[in-house]
Amino acid sequence: MTAARGWRIERRQQIRDINGKRVVVATGVVRDLQGRLRVALAVDNGPTLLFDTVERNVLAAHLEQSREDVTRLERNDR
């Protein structure tokens, strides 16, 4: 498991990747290079992604659409 990133606010969730390996997904609040507070996301030891309001909303919508896709596909597999 990866160590804490030292962000201003950090939440960590351990989940499995596509190969079944345990990884840590971290979300939280950081300061960007200009000193602004930004929402951040990182998977395991990968890079930190910073989101503005529009990007956060699009990402949240895409995750919801993917959840709905899984539900639809599971219904069709029966």
Image (cartoon, rainbow, N blue to C red):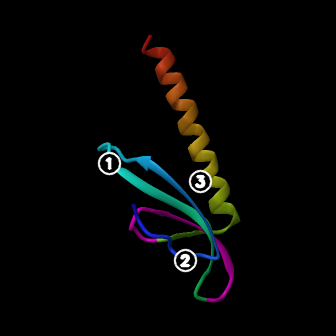
Distance from the alpha carbon under mark 2 to that under mark 1: 24 Å
Residue 26 in percent (x, y) is at: 53, 62
Helix, strand or loop at mark 1: loop
55 shown above or below 17: below
Q: Which of marks 3 and 1 is nearer the N terminus?
A: 1
Question: Would you say the residues marked 2 and 1 are in contact, meaning their CB atoms lie under 8 Å apart?
Answer: no
Q: Quadrant of the C terminus?
A: top left
Q: Earlier in the sequence, mark 2 or mark 1?
A: 2
Q: Which of marks 3 and 2 is in front?
A: 2
Q: In this view, does 20 lie to the left or right of 62?
A: left
Q: Which amino acid type is marked by label 2?
A: Gly
Q: Which amino acid type is marked by label 3?
A: Leu
Picture disc at residue 21: 1
Q: In this view, does 15 lie to the left or right of 32?
A: left
Q: In this view, does 78 lie to the left or right of 39?
A: left
Residue 49 in percent (x, y) is at: 51, 69
**The furthest residue to the bottom:** 34
Picture disc at residue 59: 3
Within 10 angstroms of label 3, few (less than 14), some, or many (20 or more) residues? few
Which of 63 and 40 lies nearest the eye of the viewer?
40
Residue that badge 2 annotates: 6
Instruction: Kindly identify the residue that appears in the image at 47 percent across and 23 percent down.
Output: 73
Distance from the alpha carbon under mark 3 to that under mark 1: 24 Å
Magenta highlight range: 34-47
Helix, strand or loop at mark 3: helix
Q: Which amino acid type is marked by label 1?
A: Lys
Q: Is residue 27 left or right of residue 53?
A: left
